Image (cartoon, rainbow, N blue to C red):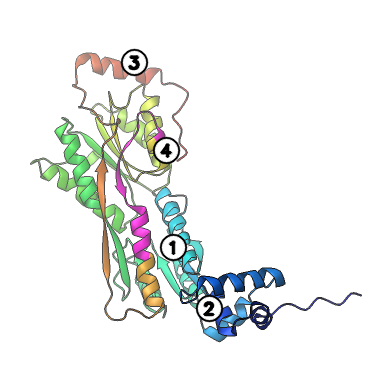
Amino acid sequence: MKDRQKRASSKDVAKLAGVSLGSVSRVINKFDNVTPEVREKVERAMATLDYRPNHVAQTLRSRTSRTVGCMLTDITNPLYANLFRVFEDKFREAGYLVLLANSMNNAAWEMDILEMFRSRGMDGVLLAPSNERNPKVIAAVNQLGIPAVIVDRDISVRQDHVQFDHARGIEEAVSTLIGLGHRRIAIVLSGIESRPMRRRLEGFRAGFAAHGLKPVDKLVVRMPSSTGNAFERIEAMLASPHPPTAILSLGTNVLGDVLSSIAARGLRVPQDVSVVSMGDPEFARSHVPAIATVSIDIDLAAAESARLLLERMQGSVEGKPRRVVIPTKFVPRGSCAPAAQPSADMAVKRSRRGLAAPSNRASRSL
């Protein structure tokens, strides 16, 4: 039987490249203090020898796994999907692999994930737990013993935070709609008690208060989750005697359900109902008309999260937890127009449309 070919070592790479073993280590670990010439020699030697670093051995020697854990609630949410994409880019540039775990709003899963991150020697973690006020989840985060950045959660732990200013963008959107004559404005939120939902509702109410008005309580719609089916709830609301003239929707598949229910009632955007997405999925930009949004600078949010975590992992920053706030802004588009004036003709029109709803729904995939 043919002997198994001996695997090349870092010493073999150093010898072929004509550099020190330390230079090979710095290239492998993507350190900056390597000249382009040395880096090119080492990478050429690695390719020639088909050298593959032994990451287990590296972890034992350096006490670093070069991995970062990332716990999000649901990666099907476009906001989290886009955040994770940029997280991967930022940490890859720094020589780290990002491992994703979905908690699906389950507190027990979140504690299991946190324990897995800790026991497997992650260098740091990015966390967005849905159960941010669960004492056991809070205790698990505090007991991690590794650097962490909490992403858009109000959780009382001794870690750095990156938070989104949801209220500001929502208040701006509501104020714009009121300026267009809308008073019956609906908002569709997740019923999960989390920071994003609380801050969005605060901004919603603040937008009305700025004009000396109050929102209609029945037009605050709470869904079981941010990615659940909302079609029937929204269609029933539109079929009511006093339907909304504008809707603020989560920018997940819920937005697709909102648009589908509007079409199913025979109504038009924005002539009959104005629509604003909380979040800016690609679908919102390509829809006709384009959907106005309350948007977050995802690149900035991810870059700041990565910066805070890398500084902690590399020991360049110590001391008290830091907090960075990422602004949101309202981006007007063709889905917003002056409120349609109610009339007897409109009431008859709504009734007739309700009897003959079109069978084809708007696209619900975002």
> Element type at marker 3?
helix
Disc number lying in front (2 or 3): 2
Quadrant of residue 48 within the rendered picture: bottom right
Disc number lying in front (2 or 1): 2
* Along the line of sight, the residue nearer the viewer: 271 or 97: 97
Q: If you read the primary sequence from the N terminus, does the residue marked by circle 1 or circle 3 appear first?
A: 1
Identity of the residue drawn at 50% across and 69% down: 96
Q: If you read the primary sequence from the N terminus, does the residue marked by circle 3 or circle 4 appear first?
A: 4
Residue 224's place in the image compared with 355, above or below, is: below
Q: Name the residue under label 1.
A: 90
The verdict on residue 302 being magenta is: yes
What is the spatial separation of the Cα atoms under label 1 and label 3, in whole angstroms?
54 Å
- Bin the neighbour count of mark 1 within 10 Å (Cα to Cα): few under 14, some 14-19, many 20 and up: many
Q: Which amino acid does label 1 sit on?
A: Lys
> Element type at marker 1?
helix
* Along the line of sight, the residue nearer the viewer: 282 or 104: 282
Disc number lying in front (3 or 4): 4
Q: Mark 3 points at which residue?
A: 352
